[in-house]
Amino acid sequence: MATSLRQRFGRPEREMRLRVICAPLGPGKVRLLEAIGETASINQAAKRMGLTYARAWGMVEELNGCFEGPLVESTTGGRNGGGTRLTPLGTEVVGLYRAIEAKAAAAAAAELAALGARVVKPAEGEEAGD
């Protein structure tokens, strides 16, 4: 049975995505960092993204080992309980990633629109990833 391109490669993206090759940093990990910054919790950030805690924690450990310092810091227990926060470096990395992404999207806007116009629209009742 032949597999379709959509089955092999997933749904086509309708927006530009940036992946930093020199580090394991892409849109999913940046969203995780942003969610950690908003929730102050790896667990809550993982739930928000539909990830297991173990998967999110593994992503954080990978990111923390990849840059000149940690992007995320956790504190344990105590009177007010533990928590998690982005470090100043983590906040900077998210900001730099989003700035690069925005500049690249603006520079390629015409080409992205032309490419998007040529993407096959899903049939009625079919989701884009099907």
Image (cartoon, helix red, strand yellow):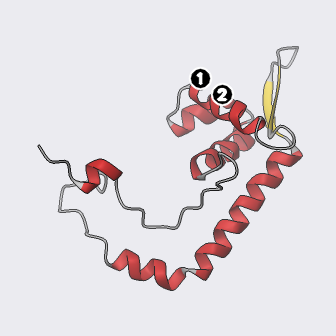
- What's the distance in space between the residues labelled 1 and 2, CA to CA? 5 Å
Q: Is mark 1 on a helix, strand or loop?
A: helix
- Residue 45 lies in quadrant: top right
Q: Where is residue 119 in the image (x, y as percent from the top left)?
A: 31, 71
| Mark linked to residue 121 | none
Establish if 123 lies above or below 102. above
Point out the residue furthest to the bottom here. 110
Along the line of sight, which residue is nearer the eye, 48 or 26? 26
Q: Where is residue 14 in the image (x, y as percent from the top left)?
A: 42, 67
Q: Name the residue under label 1.
A: 54
Question: Are the residues flagged by discs 1 and 2 in contact, CB closer than 8 Å?
Answer: yes
Q: What residue type is labelled 1?
A: Ala
Q: Where is residue 22 in the image (x, y as percent from the top left)?
A: 70, 52
Is residue 21 at all visible to an observer of this figure?
yes
Please give the name of the residue rendered at 37% of the width and 61% of the height, measured from the top-left corner. 12
- Binning the other alpha carbons within 10 Å of mark 1 as few (below 14), some (14 to 19) or many (20 upward) gives few
Establish if 70 lies above or below 58. below
| Mark linked to residue 57 | 2
- Residue 17 lies in quadrant: bottom right
Q: What residue type is labelled 2?
A: Trp
Left-right relation of 93 to 54: right
Is residue 130 at all visible to an observer of this figure?
no
Left-right relation of 54 to 84: left
